[in-house]
Image (cartoon, rainbow, N blue to C red):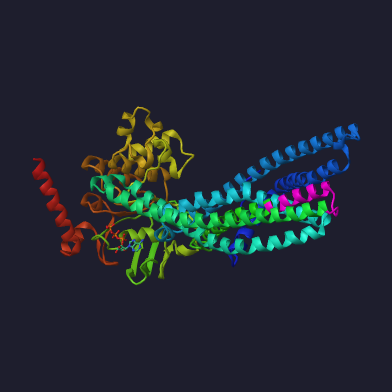
Amino acid sequence: MNQTTAPISLPANRFKTLGNTLTSLLKPHKAWAGAALAALLTGSAMSLSMPMLFRWLIDSGFLQGQHPEGLNRAFGLILLVVFILAVATACRFYLVTTLGERISADLRNRVYGHLLIQRPEFFETLKVGEVLSRLTADTTLIQTLVGSSLSFALRNSLTTLGGLVMLVLTSPYLSGAVLVLVVVVMVPVVVLARRVRTLSRASQDKLADSSAIAQEVLNQITTVQAFNQEGTEAAKFNASSERMYTTSKHRTVNRAALLFVAIGLAFAGLVVVLWMGAKAVANGQMSGGELAQFVMYAAFVGGGFAALSEVLGEFQRAAGAAERLVELLNLNTMIRSRGLPSPQQQGGFHIEFNHVDFAYPSAPDKSVLSDFNLTIRRGETVAVVGPSGAGKSTLFNLLLRWYDVRSGQILIENTPLEHLDVTGWREHCAYVSQEAVVFSGTLGDNVRYGKPQASEADVLQALTDAAAIQFVTRLPEGLNTSVGEKGVRLSGGERQRVSIARAILRNAGLLLLDEATASLDAESERLVQLAIEQSRHGRTTLIIAHRLATVMAADRIVVMNEGQIVEMGTHRELMARQGLYAKLASLQFIDQKAEKHLLA
Ligand SMILES: Nc1ncnc2c1ncn2[C@@H]1O[C@H](COP(=O)(O)OP(=O)(O)OP(=O)(O)O)[C@@H](O)[C@H]1O
């Protein structure tokens, strides 16, 4: 079976959601599902034929030794039925289980693929741990449903239905009694099942909560340990686990009650029917074979109902899971654009911020940029400085289209950024974030992240430009060294140089550096500075920096405060103005002097 990506729509109620989700997932695997259904039907037909064979065996007189050959033939036939039943069951098991696995893999891929194109704001409101739980636990529930519960339910529905028909054909009188029994069993089952359904969703939510807690803490384990918060964090997790346990216990009590009612009432009823049947045989109204056949079918029907009531719980859980997954699949925080191709530029891009107003969607009342105007010429290097929270990184967030402006426009070569195809535009951007991001894998893979086809020579050149080649050559396996999860085996400065090398290798028209050299020592910073200066030809570069050395090398310095530009010019011009820049710069000089004094 192959992977698929058919669309899923959001229907009104939960079971409809489940039905639609399953239909959409099964559609591409029609042949497979058809084969599974055929195996299931064959198996059920074989099961249903058994009671008839036994009736024939009892009533034909074979057992009294009247036709010894007939007896052999009868048992031969029963053996054949058993063989077909076994083959059909094995085939059904294989087909149905693989179908479940295939579908859950498809679903997981579809949800993950959809998550990857959502904007960062979505991940601000939903914790990553919760998303992961939906991706694993909820898809597993759907897998269980398709890979076992659904076929179990179908099989039991068929034997129950077939059994009911055969009951009526065998003895209409006794069937009436069985029908009353079915009604008596079904009413409490439906009531309890509804309660189980509500509790199912609650327990899934609690599970997601606790994995979100663990996720966050494990990601920040060093901070947790440095502040001796292991106990507190364990207690928080315990409390969340306890809440989950209590909800699950509640649900299990209800499921147990469901089982008691279903099985208890079904078997009690069966005894009553048996008693009525025994009296009918004693009165000569029925043959012994007919009673045996009736009892076997009644057992099918009773067992079938009990099994169905049990599997109903699985359906409730899967329905909850489907609802949560469809919620994710219907997320609509994707970036919209007119899909225009990005302007091709060899010498960088001309960028204009025109009367831009912006607030983050999670804090719409707090204006971050207001009436912001800035023109960056093609090939220019602009340093953006300003106090923390001034809105510097926000400029990058907008340029990379993680967010859109509230009003005003950003123009790239006179085309509104919002009209450009997002992937195409990002192809022209190279970005180094404040926190150096390194993925698990090898060092080479990390540098190649934005340009997988780059040659080893290019990778080594990028590392040289990023002042990283010395530490890389010292590593035992060089580019093939594994850096550990999140690059834990590298120092902060090394991680930063790797992410700078990644950006340099990309050779993009717009280079965005967000405090990229903050964790470097003075010598490495000087080297990286040199590399940036060399590579700035032929591209537009925006640098957010606190260090004077980085800032002074720029063509122009933009000073921001509270979402607006307060000063602009070269280092010399700005120093002469004695404004905010001069103040920030003097603080830097004082720091540097103090540093020198300490080192002396
Ligand atoms: N995702 C977000 N949701 C809501 N508010 C945000 C978000 N990101 C940033 N902000 C707020 O927007 C303002 C500007 O943030 P920004 O990151 O652009 O500042 P900055 O100048 O880069 O600061 P720093 O030098 O500390 O990195 C800050 O007040 C910040 O609290």
**Which residues, given as a range, are shown in magenta?**
283-302
Task: Decide which of 514, 223 is in the foreground and name it.
Answer: 223
Quarter in which the N terminus is drawn: top right
Kindly identify the residue that appears in the image at 65 percent across and 60 percent down: 185
Direction top: furthest residue = 476
Give yes or no for residue 292 being in the magenta stretch. yes
Judge by depth and name the residue closer to the eye, 172 or 288. Answer: 288
What residue is drawn where x is 81% and y is 36%? 80
Q: Nearer the viewer, residue 345 or 14?
A: 14
Give the percent coordinates (x, y) of residue 101: 60, 44
Residue 342: where, in percent of width, then height?
49, 57
User: Quadrant where the C terminus lies?
Assistant: top left
Q: Is residue 6 left or right of residue 117?
A: right
Of residues 184 and 325, the one drawn nearer to the viewer in this rendering = 184
> Which residue sits at x=28%, y=51%?
232
- How many marks do you count on the picture? 0
In the rendered image, residue 447, in percent from the top left (x then y), is placed at 40, 40
User: Picture quarter containing residue 20?
Assistant: bottom right
